Amino acid sequence: MEHIEYTVIVTLLALIQFMFFSIQVGAMRAKHGVIAPAITGNPEFERMFRVQQNTMEQLVVFVPALWIYAYLVNPLWGAGIGLFFLIGRFIYRAAYLKDPGSRSNGFTIGVLATAVLLVWSLVAAVMLLI
């Protein structure tokens, strides 16, 4: 498959981003004395924990959608769309840490990127059957 390395790079960046968020959760635990397995106790920790958890929830849909799109449609375009997911996650993180009520823009960017991958892949799969 031509240009599949772009899909690989975006997938790895998404996983690295998730690991970065996970490390930040651990740092917040230490900073605020939130002893595992507790997931409450300090608002700053709780916000970072929610960012990490929401990112994990989104990855469950994003990663397969990215790869299905790469396989059925175009790996280069899929990687480009995938970059919007990553950008959306960083915007989501920044907004959620500052004010959880302002997280919608980042969330929307990521969800729209995933939705484009999903819908376009479904159309491509159906077209291949016709």
Image (cartoon, grey):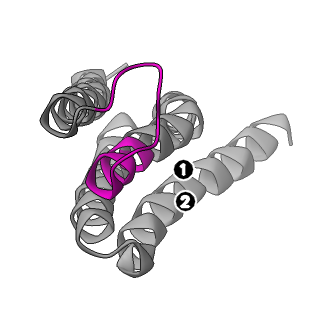
Can you name the residue that lies furthest to the right here? 130
Q: Residue at x 23, y 72 (%)?
A: 98
> Looking at the image, can residue 13 be seen?
yes
Quadrant of the snapshot with the C terminus: top right
Hey, which quadrant is residue 92 in on the image? bottom left
- Tell me: 103 left or right of 65: left
Give the percent coordinates (x, y) of residue 9. 21, 27
Vertical placement of residue 38 versus 85, above or below: above
Inspect the image, locate mark 1, and give the three-letter code of the amino acid beneath it. Answer: Leu
Q: 113 or 97: which is nearer to us?
A: 97
Disc 1 + disc 2, Cβ < 8 Å? yes
Q: Is residue 37 magenta?
A: yes
Which residues fall within the magenta stretch? 34-51
Inspect the image, locate mark 2, and give the three-letter code of the amino acid beneath it. Answer: Val
Hey, which quadrant is residue 14 in on the image? top left
Q: From the image, tell me which residue sits under label 2.
A: 116
Q: Residue at x 43, y 59 (%)?
A: 110
Circle 2 SS class = helix
Q: From the image, tell me which residue sits under label 1.
A: 117
Q: Residue at x 40, y 19 (%)?
A: 36
Quadrant of the snapshot with the N terminus: top left
Label 2 neighbour load within 10 Å: few <14, some 14-19, many 20+: some
Give the percent coordinates (x, y) of residue 103. 39, 72
Label 1 neighbour load within 10 Å: few <14, some 14-19, many 20+: many
Q: Is residue 90 magenta?
A: no
